[in-house]
Image (tube, grey):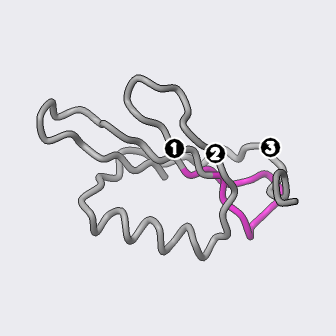
Amino acid sequence: MQLSAISKISGEPSMVVDFFPILGSTSFIYKVLKFRGVDTMSTSCIRTERFYSECAERIDLGYDVTGFNTEPVNVNPMNGVC
């Protein structure tokens, strides 16, 4: 899923949050946060439960659903835990 915060001034996305399924995992989702003008601000792996609540919170805040990412990415959900 792709969620975008649309700027009230320019009408273009000012912040985009992408969520990708992780290859071989149904418990984790890969999250990528981007700001306009910056390729990638931060990345993290979150639990599926957190994905559902974060999507609901961001949509309640006025974010628009601007795409669906269905292609799994090959990342290690435990990378950076320790």
* Figure check: 33 above or below 53: above
Write down the region rendered in magenta.
19-30
Badge 2: residue crowd in 10 Å (few <14, some 14–19, many ≥20): some
Where is residue 46? Give x, y as percent.
66, 63
Callout in the foreground (2, 3): 2
Secondary structure at numbered mark 3 = loop
Q: Earlier in the sequence, mark 3 or mark 1?
A: 1
Q: CA distance from mark 2 to mark 1?
A: 6 Å
The residues tagged by marks 2 and 3 sit, at their Cα atoms, a distance apart of 13 Å
Say which residue appears at 31% left-offset and 36% top-offset. Answer: 14
Residue contact at pointers 2 and 1, CB within 8 angstroms: yes
Q: Nearer the viewer, mark 3 or mark 1?
A: 1
**What residue would you read off at disc 1?**
33
For the residue labelled by badge 1, is the local secondary structure a helix, a strand or a loop? Answer: strand
| Residue 43 marker | 2
Determine the CA span between mark 3 and mark 1. Answer: 17 Å
Residue appearing at x 55%, y 67% in the figure: 51
Question: Which numbered disc covers residue 65?
Answer: none
In the drawing, does residue 17 fall left or right of residue 36? Answer: right
Badge 1: few (under 14), some or many (20 or more) residues near its Cα, within 10 Å?
some
Dot 2 or dot 3: first in sequence order is 2
Query: Residue flagged by tag 3: what amino acid is it?
Result: Asn
Confirm whether the magenta stretch covers residue 23: yes
